[in-house]
Amino acid sequence: MAENKIVTTLLTIVHIVIDSLLEFILGWYLGVKKECSPPSEQEKPVVSKSAVELATLIRQRKLKAYDVVKVYCERIKTVGISQLNAVVDGPFTAEALKEAEEIDRKLDNGEYTEEELQAKPFLGVPFTTKDSTAVGGKLHTLGLVSRKNERAPEDAECVKLMKESGAIIIATSSVPEVNRWIETRNKLIGQTKNPYDLRRSVGGSSGGEAALIASCSTAFGLGTDIGGSIRIPSFNCGVFGHKPTRNVVNMRGCTFRTGKEEHTMVAAGPMTRYAKDLMPIFKVLTGPVMAEKLKLSKPVDLKKLRFFYIPCNNMKQCNPVNRETQMVMYKIRKHFQNITGAEVKLAVLPHLEISGKMWRYWMTQEPANFNNLLGNGVELNPFVELFKKLIGQSEFTMAAIFSLIDSILPKEKEEFIRSATQELKKALQDLLGDDGVLFYHSSPRTAPFHYYPLVKFLDFSYFSIFNVLQTPVTQVPMGLDSNGMPLGIQVVASDMNDRFCIAVAEELERQFGGWVQP
């Protein structure tokens, strides 16, 4: 017991030393801190509103869809592209403004029936989506040089549903190569920057999306999540993101998915500045039949829920949870204890210490082959690609090379991982039942500098474990740390209880403020 304690203490010291060195070296290399430009006085009346509020104001004719789209398209150009490097294709100014103009004309002339308006809850509201999610006729590169001119033949299902709800697509955002990295950098357009500190990571893979949302360059966005790809960028950039229960949102058109895959960890969901937008967008993405199954319109009484927390995942490869992050959990526990009159209980779940190994194994069971995707249909040789990288002739980032090398390293023990996953899944289900919510740290620390994850990357296991378990999770911003970077928390519920996650997110926003403007 004493020996274990000594080892744990030494590992903690090693993590702190390496973390401090990386922060110092990368901070020196990347220079002084810079933030993105704040909204102008002319932009604020539009970009300060939630997507739901914008839709209401447009229907009430207090705002014109044309003006809303114009403001966002201009801000994408001046901030999303010029400062953050977060856009692959767009803004689609001319066609988006034409669509908005037609909406304004029909609203002014009373040409929409009440039924049509109810079916279009986001009429006239601009949105964006990540490049790997198909938008018909627009670039669909997946961050690959080999696909720099490829265009999607049709909309992904989630994009189609948002368009049918009246929302107007205005751009597609940057991703790491084929979505598989926790930073957003590729050889096609380069590094995407964090609105709060241009030197720091936006996360991945929906990194461009989070950067646009946080910087007020889009009203809301759509992300996909196979290992934290909605939640990591949402955390790094201080916005809300919801990873749904598996298979409740059709994945057709997301990274070449057909929508018929039964066994996959990937899910698509909304990313927003305001918690109040999550549920209405989620209802559009699920469709009315699934929304009914999920009971999304049923009110949630927070006083009747049971709350739990876990202070760390016990993975020795992860950073220790820092003090400011610990304080976030403390504040949340105190708040929900005041609401319910009951203790937010400490929970213990089995096998969290092998979270990284579980995700690594289950990625090998995905229907999509990373090596093949990276090669755009051609199998790549990791040794050849590494050599090309070393002589400066590679079309891929070092992160992509890492993933290629990982594919030839020894595999995880299948029987052990499957058994551990089953035990953990059952333990979580038994803990939460049909009325429980778990608070789980997003990460032991806030967004690191660019390139930091090339040295230390396993903190993402705090996110990826819920892809393994395929449970609903909402990422919630919780103010800024002493470096001015977003803090956050994950809100977890059992399968099909997405509404609990979102209701708790709304309460956390009400109490603690939610998104903070960079």
Image (spheres, rainbow, N blue to C red):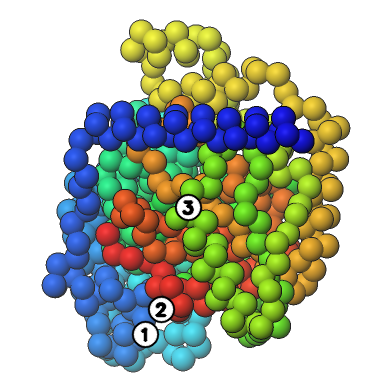
- Nearer to us: label 3 or label 1: 3
Residue 80 - label: none
Q: Which residue is mark 1?
A: 56
Note whether 374 is above or below 128 in the view shown. Answer: above
Q: Relative to 172, is 94 on the left or the right?
A: left
Q: Which residue is mark 3?
A: 323
Helix, strand or loop for disc 2: helix
Note whether 298 is above or below 129 in the view shown. Answer: below
Label 3 – label 2 distance at C-alpha: 36 Å
Quarter of the image where the N terminus is located: top right
Q: Which residue is mark 2?
A: 52
Contact (CB < 8 A) between labels 3 and 2? no
Q: Relative to 518, is 509 on the left or the right?
A: right
Q: Position of residue 214 (x, y in %)?
A: 34, 59
Amino acid beneath label 2: Val
Label 3 – label 1 distance at C-alpha: 41 Å
Residue count near mark 3 (Cα–Cα under 10 Å), binned few <14, some 14–19, many ≥20: few
Amino acid beneath label 3: Arg
Helix, strand or loop for disc 1: helix
Residue count near mark 2 (Cα–Cα under 10 Å), binned few <14, some 14–19, many ≥20: some
